[in-house]
Image (cartoon, rainbow, N blue to C red):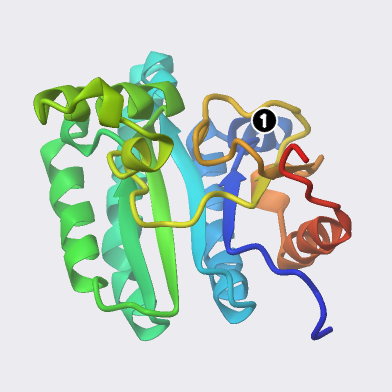
Amino acid sequence: MPDEVRPRHVAIIADGNRRWARERGLPVLAGHVAGIEAIRPIVRRARDLGVETLSVYTFSTENWARPEDEVSGLFGLIDGAVRQYTDELIDEGVRVRVIGRLHEAPADVQRSIRAAQDRTRDGSRMTLNICFNYSGRAEIVDAARALVAANADPNDVTEPHFAEHLYTAGQPDVDLVIRTGGDQRTSNFLLWQAAYAELVFCPQYWPDFRVADFDAALAEFDQRERRFGS
């Protein structure tokens, strides 16, 4: 409907890949494969609906504590997916940005992601933030470090000034956070940007999350009264 309120920035905590696999008697990595495939139709739908920015939590700094074979396998999947789908994203007008400490990732993954960022830089229909090796607290620390390195006068540091040093500088704040998998927490995700975001929690594991579920989350967002503390 034309009077529907659309979020400018949607952030997704794509949770439940491992549980999805275990409940089916599959290796954990199979859940991550299914999770990567689940992203593609959501990216297309968000773009078609006019969402300006879509952020997807793919790997947190805390995920390094998982078994080594799972972490290395996940890196391989991310590397392969970036290589495989970059042309598709270019065709769809989607610009890719990586949000997180990319420099800590394996060198081949860094190269693939940087190449994708470069090749999709002219995408104007939507920005896709791949939140990789990401932590909301680490992002705030990195922004503070950048201000210190720039010899910023403490009296000149305002919220807009601080936001210019976040990974998402120049992007709108998050309007809607969607979390799959049934848990109801934000898990250190976009803490600054999502300060006034609406939260929608979905019981489906991420590999089972469909376009219809995305539409339902946006319909719920449309029904919320956003007061921003007023």
Above or below: residue 33 compared with residue 216: above
Above or below: residue 228 compared with residue 42: above
Q: Classify mark 1: residues with Cα within 10 Å, few (<14), some (14-19) or many (20+).
A: some
Above or below: residue 77 compared with residue 42: above
For the point 66% across and 40% down, the residue is 196
Residue at the extreme front of the image, as rendered = 155
Above or below: residue 63 compared with residue 84: above
Q: Quadrant of residue 108?
A: top left
Quadrant placement of the N terminus:
bottom right
Residue indicated by mark 1: 19
190 vs 219, left or right, is: left
For the residue pair 185 and 206, the one nearer the viewer reads as 185
Residue at the extreme top of the image, as rendered = 65
Q: Quadrant of residue 221?
A: bottom right
For the point 17% across and 66% down, the residue is 118
Q: Amino acid at mark 1?
A: Arg
Quadrant placement of the C terminus:
top right
203 vs 155, left or right, is: right
